[in-house]
Image (tube, rainbow, N blue to C red):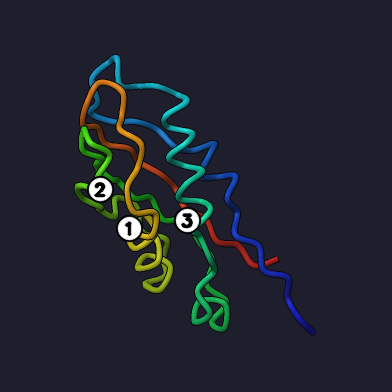
Amino acid sequence: MSKRIFANLIAVFAGAMIVAAPAHAQSADWQRNIARMIAAKQTYPRAAQMRGDEGTAKVKLTVAADGSLGSVELVGPSGSSVLDREALALPAKVGKFPAPPGGSTSVVLPFTWKLM
């Protein structure tokens, strides 16, 4: 029996929030764009699939004023070390982001993996 694999990318869009950002940098459009860019790179790690790992990892990323990725920090573990490593690696897979309005900012994004 094969399982359909589904990476719940909708959680990325619905659960993203900006933290520690200047008021004028809290652009919802920019935030959604960042979430979409990262979600496009999200995959379900084979090792996690084989072990039946599921969960949501929350990652805080800092984006510099020029759009470069500053730092990535796990702020909410998924319960799976494989999924946590993948969540930490996702932002770097995008490369450079659009410059945040108003300068450097931090965003917390949830990444959810669920076997269906």
Residue on which the image places disc 1: 92
Name the mark nearer the viewer: 3 or 2. Answer: 2
Secondary element at image label 1: helix
Q: Is residue 85 left or right of residue 103?
A: right
Give the x, y percent position of residue 63. Answer: 26, 40
Residue on which the image places disc 2: 69
- The span from disc 3 to disc 2 (Cα, nearest Å) is 22 Å
- The span from disc 1 to disc 3 (Cα, nearest Å) is 18 Å
Residue depicted at 23% across the width and 28% down the height:
20
Which one is in front, 3 or 67?
67
Q: Is residue 84 above or below residue 22?
A: below
Task: Name which of mark 1 and mark 2 comes first in the sequence.
Answer: 2
- Amino acid type shown at disc 2: Leu
Q: Residues within 10 Å of mark 3 (few under 14, many from 20)?
A: many
Q: Are marks 1 and 2 in contact (CB under 8 Å)?
A: yes
Name the mark nearer the viewer: 1 or 3. Answer: 1
Residue on which the image places disc 3: 56
